[in-house]
Image: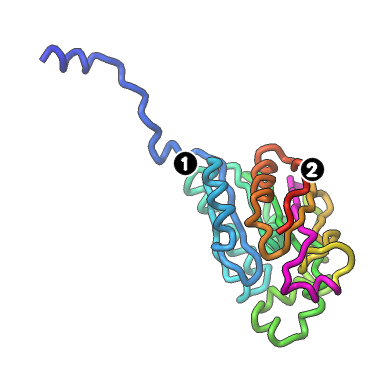
């Protein structure tokens, strides 16, 4: 009885934070590219979770509807999941077309909880690859209405989006995958097999980094993941070593 009384008199020891306490984190919403899935962002998602972020790795039907519709579906869903976890501010990490979804949404809807955005290989000024492929039946069949909006011309969505007025870091590649060699030939200047380095840029961006990786696989590269985390924390990239080619 005395031992129990003595124990009850002791001040409670600090509890290990439960799930609710651990959820008071910064949120990161991941948006994959055209004709891809959340699985393509899996390695990035795991690394961000290890870093302590609350990660929302979204799937959205990228080939089934226009970019405007996709943006108004996917971005609010990511925001909803962050809010449900009381996780803020809300960062975004996007691959390829995913960056255009975020830009379209933010052009039309303020997001007070917005943090920083890292765009990987975004066709911010459209893509000559989309220009070259848009009239082929296979491209239309595989990529759907959104694929027809990725060109550099007046009917492309890039021409209708404004400069960014929020912190954006862009990482793009200057190597192409073997199956993109013929596209790399028709894209002016350096490119990643799908997007010209110059066309990945967007007016108002905070930082820009070119690394020796290709469009389909850039989000899985260790250096890209490292620089993504750096930008989310610090708002800038390390412009030092160029990284290892794939």
| Location of residue 157 in the rendering, given as x and y in whole percent from the top left corner | 77, 68
Q: Locate the C terminus by quadrant.
A: bottom right
Q: Is residue 171 magenta?
A: yes
| Location of residue 194 in the rendering, given as x and y in whole percent from the top left corner | 76, 68
Label count reads: 2
**Secondary structure category for the residue under label 1:** loop
Q: Nearer the viewer, residue 135 or 191?
A: 191
Question: In the rendering, which numbered label is found on residue 239?
Answer: 2
Vertical relation: 146 (above or below) 52:
below
Residue drawn at the location 77% of the way across and 44% of the way down: 241
Vertical relation: 11 (above or below) 73:
above
Q: Is residue 161 magenta?
A: no
Residue drawn at the location 64% of the way across and 44% of the way down: 229
Query: For residue 206, which quarter of the picture?
Result: top right
Q: Nearer the viewer, residue 103 or 228?
A: 228
Region in magenta: 165-185
Describe the colour scheme in one phrase: rainbow
Q: Residue furthest bottom?
A: 137
Q: Marks 1 and 2: in contact by CB < 8 Å?
A: no
Mark 1 highlights which residue?
Answer: 23
Q: Nearer the viewer, residue 107 or 217?
A: 217
Q: In 3D space, how far apart are the residues under numbered discs 2 and 1 (Cα atoms)? A: 33 Å
* Relative to 28, 134 lies left or right: right
Vertical relation: 205 (above or below) 25:
below
Q: Nearer the viewer, residue 28 or 242?
A: 242
| Location of residue 117 in the rendering, given as x and y in whole percent from the top left corner | 69, 49
Q: Is residue 53 visible?
A: yes
| Location of residue 176 in the rendering, given as x and y in whole percent from the top left corner | 76, 66
Residue drawn at the location 68% of the way across and 77% of the way down: 145
Crowd around label 2: few <14 · some 14–19 · many ≥20 (10 Å): few
């Amino acid at each position: 009885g005395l031992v129990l009384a003595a124990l009850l008199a002791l001040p409670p020891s600090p509890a290990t934070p439960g799930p609710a306490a651990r959820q008071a984190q910064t949120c990161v919403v991941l948006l994959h590219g055209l004709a891809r899935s959340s699985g393509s962002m899996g390695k990035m998602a795991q690394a961000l979770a290890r870093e302590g972020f609350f990660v929302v790795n979204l799937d959205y039907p990228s080939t089934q509807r226009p970019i405007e519709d996709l943006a108004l579906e996917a971005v609010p869903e990511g925001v909803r999941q962050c809010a449900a976890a009381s996780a803020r501010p809300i960062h975004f990490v996007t691959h390829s077309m995913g960056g255009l979804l975020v830009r379209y949404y933010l052009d039309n809807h303020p997001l007070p909880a917005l943090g920083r955005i890292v765009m990987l290989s975004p066709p911010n000024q459209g893509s000559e690859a989309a220009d070259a492929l848009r009239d082929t039946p296979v491209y239309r069949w595989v990529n759907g209405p959104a694929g027809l909006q990725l060109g550099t011309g007046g009917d492309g969505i890039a021409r209708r989006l404004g400069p960014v007025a929020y912190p954006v870091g862009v990482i793009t590649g200057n190597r192409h995958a073997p199956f993109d060699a013929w596209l790399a030939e028709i894209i002016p200047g350096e490119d990643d097999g799908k997007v010209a380095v110059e066309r990945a840029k967007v007016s108002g961006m905070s930082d820009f980094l070119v690394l020796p990786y290709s469009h389909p696989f850039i989000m899985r590269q260790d250096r890209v993941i490292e620089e993504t985390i750096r930008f989310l924390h610090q708002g800038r990239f390390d412009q030092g070593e160029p990284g290892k080619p794939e």
